[in-house]
Amino acid sequence: MYSISKKITIGKQVSIAKNSFINNEIYPFVEIGFSCCNCGHENSVIIKPYESGFPIFQIYDEDKVLSKNELLESKLVSETNYNANYLGELTVNNLATLYFGTDCSSCHLKYIGVFSFGEKQPGLEILTVSGIWNYKEIE
């Protein structure tokens, strides 16, 4: 898992078996599996609450990696409801939203994943994976 600092273009979204986890399903970690859209290799990513990921704001701050419009058009995130704006302009499920970069362990195709984590209501913690997309760096 790594942060992304260069400009990128979003490619194809890969399918994941499950994208929403609640309470005890989240701890000690969530493992997300996906098949590489280039070579078909089965990959997995482990998300540990409060440890994994980087703030999504880093992606769209001053359009360094992607613009807000690119994030919205690719459906990585959605606009935050007014009552949760303290989490940022763009979120998943109106919760703290993070991203990560990862590579296919076989062909090294690059992927970006986006997820949110937090307490949706008292006693209900949710981790929602928006998805995993392949990407290319722009030179």
Image (spheres, helix red, strand yellow):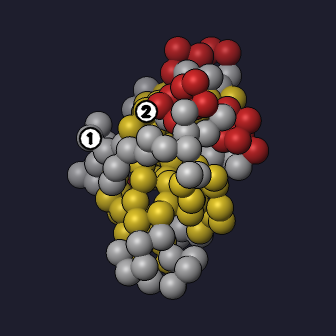
Q: Is residue 22 visible?
A: no
What's the mark number on residue 55? Answer: 2
Q: Nearer the viewer, residue 59 or 87?
A: 59
- Please name whichever residue, 20 or 57, is drawn nearer the observer in this view of the structure: 57
Amino acid type of the residue that numbered disc 1 sits on in the rendered structure: Glu
**Observer able to see residue 73:** yes
Residue 16, image x, y percentages: 54, 67
In depth, the one of 45 and 21 nearer the eye is 45
Q: CA distance from mark 1 to mark 2?
A: 12 Å
Which quarter of the picture shows residue 46?
Answer: bottom left
Number of numbered discs? 2
Q: Is label 1 in a helix, a strand or a loop? A: loop
> At which x and y percent is residue 39?
51, 85
Answer above or below: position of 90 versus 10.
above
Amino acid type for the residue under numbered disc 2: Pro
Residue 51 is marked as: 1
- As drawn, the residue found furthest toward the left would be 28
Q: Residue at coordinates 52% horizontally, 70% vertically from top-left? A: 17
Residue drawn at x 47%, y 63% as measured from the top left: 110
The outermost residue toward the front is 139
Q: Residue at x 44, y 41 (%)?
A: 5
User: Taking 89 as reference, is 64 above or below it?
Assistant: below
Residue 98, x across and y down, in percent: 45, 39
